[in-house]
Every structure is written in structure tokens, then in C-alpha cells.
Amino acid sequence: MTAEAATLTQRLLEEVSWDQKEIMILGKRVLQPRLVAYEADAPELYYTYSRQQLRPETWHPVVAEIKAKVEQLTSQTYNSCLLNLYRNGRDTMAWHSDNEPLYGSEPVIASVSFGASRDFILRHNEERERRLSFPLGGGSVLVMGGRTQDFWVHCVPKRARCIEPRINLTFRKIVKAEDPV
């Protein structure tokens, strides 16, 4: 998707309804260190993390277009997408895995990045010194599948020299819908 990445990045920056959520970290309410949006096939496909339940918006035309391309590329179908906007290198994503029951036992997650390149780092759960680092940006696609979420955690660390925004779309398939809270 690199040929059209700049145009898609600009449209996503301008047209998506970005939000900065409050989350709980070590018992304290803090603003999440990035902006988010959440879209899905149906209004009942809620997604909860950090004690925040996200209610999906309908597919933005640009996100729907990217989703179709990713489905063709990966031979998978997805019914939800968490959109993350890292405004600059100070915005971050802490170590975590996407092992929520709503995605099933071996979820396939397609991560599409636009804008500034940022490091996406995987760390093995048991062999913590074992790490893989991928610089993602400009239309790159990373797919995690199988038992990745069982054995690895991942993060997007701070990068002080990064002054440009990065947008990441994580396409997932919800197989067991959550109840609304």
C-alpha cells in the first residue's frame, strides 16, 4: 500500500473521529498515550481493554477500502478494527498481548501502519531477552497469527526523534461478542 500511503494517511488524520481515552494504570486514571478510534461490522461488536469498553463506529470509507485490501492480502476476514494515532514519538503502546477471549484461541491480527516509521517490538514471554523489532510505517503490513499472542508480547516504545504522526490500524475478527457494560 506504499504508493497511496501518503493520501490515505492524510485522509485518516483529517476524517476519523479520534479520541483520547482515560485508562487505569496501577490503580490510577490517566490519559491514554495515543488517540484511538474503533470500527466494526455491527454495533454489538464491543471491545474492552484497560477497563474501557469501546462501542464501534461504522466503517469509514478509507478504513473499509484498506480492510478489503488486507483481507485479499491475508486471505482472512476481519470484522473489527482498532485505530491508533501516535501523534509523535512521545505517544506509545506498552507491552501487551492481544489474547482476549473475544478473538478466539489463535487470532489473526493484521496491523497496517501509515505515516512515520516506528519500531514495533515483540518480546518472548519466557525468554525475555529474545526480541524481534520491525520498523513499521508508510503502508507496511504485519500479520500475527497462530499462537503468537500466547508466547509473545509487543509494544511501540517512545522515540524522541520522531516528530511526525503514525497511524496504525489493527484488523481483527471477533468470534465471541462481549456483553455491553
Image (cartoon, helix red, strand yellow):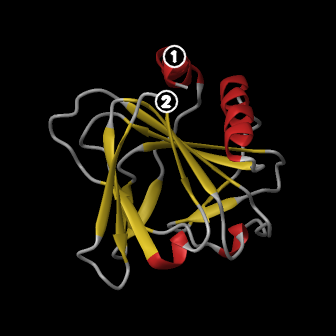
Q: Where is residue 88 in the image (x, y as percent from the top left)?
A: 28, 34
Q: Amino acid type of disc 2?
A: Gly
Say few, some or many: other residues with alpha carbon within 10 Å of mark 1 (under 14 / 14 to 19 / 20 or more).
Answer: few
Real-space CA distance between mark 1 and mark 2, rounded to the nearest whole angstrom: 8 Å
Q: According to the image, label 2 marks what residue? A: 139
Q: Which residue is drawn at 42% across and 28% down?
A: 138
178, above or below 43, in the image:
below
Q: Is residue 35 visible?
A: yes
Q: Where is residue 34 in the image (x, y as percent from the top left)?
A: 39, 45
Q: According to the image, label 1 marks what residue? A: 3
Q: Nearer the viewer, residue 38 or 125?
A: 125
Q: Which of 80 and 2 is in front in this view?
A: 2
Side of 14 where 164 appears, left or right: left
Q: Which residue is drawn at 74% across and 34% down?
A: 68
Q: Which of 149 and 177 is in front in this view?
A: 149
Q: Are marks 1 and 2 in contact (CB under 8 Å)?
A: yes
* Residue extending furthest toward the left: 161
Which of the two discs, 1 and 2, labels the residue nearer the N terminus?
1
